[in-house]
Image (tube, rainbow, N blue to C red):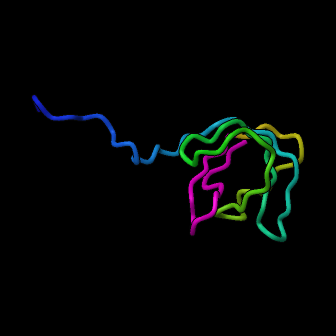
Amino acid sequence: MEGMDMTPSAGAKKAPQPVPREVRKIDAATGKITLKHGPIANLGMSAMTMAFPVKDPAMLKGLKEGDQVSATFDSVDGKATVVDLRK
């Protein structure tokens, strides 16, 4: 591959990565979870506390406020969404 530029383009999307988060609130009725999080690189978001929809509401079962979780985010229908959540 000599002579080929293998660097990602400026618009290349970063792959979703699981990162540690803290559960602040769970709203099973609406399928949302409020998380205190650091930067979410693949979505270009800075650290904050925010409510996110979850891809599968079953992910919320067994969680409570204060739990430390590993969450993976991606854009689903144009919204920052939790696509994987593990305690």
Is 74 included in the stretch rendered in magenta? yes
Residue ranking furthest to the front: 10
Q: Residue at x 71, y 62 (%)?
A: 53
Tell me residue 78's x, y (percent). Answer: 58, 65
50 vs 82, left or right, is right
Q: Residue at point 57% right, 69% down?
A: 77
Side (left or right) of 11 relative to 56:
left
Q: Which residues are magenta?
A: 70-87
Q: In the figure, 75 relative to 20: above or below?
A: below
In magenta segment, residue 84: yes
Foreground residue among 2 and 60: 2
Q: Which residue is the extreme one toward the top?
A: 2
Which residue is more in the foreground, 46 or 22?
46
Residue placed most toward the observer, 64 or 72: 72
Q: Quadrant of residue 54?
A: bottom right
Quadrant of the snapshot with the N terminus: top left
Please state the horizontal and vertical placement of residue 9, each as a whole percent of the image: 34, 43
**In terms of image quadrants, where is residue 7?**
top left
Q: How many marks?
A: 0
Q: Is residue 66 left or right of 57 when viewed as pictured?
A: right
Q: x and y percent of residue 81 in the render? A: 64, 58
Residue 27, picture quadrant: bottom right
* Residue in view at x 47 percent, y 44 percent: 15
Q: Position of residue 39 (x, y in %)?
A: 66, 37
Q: Residue at (55%, 40%) from the top-left corner?
A: 17
Please name the predominant secondary structure of the magenta segment in the image. Answer: strand
Which quarter of the figure is the C terminus placed in? top right
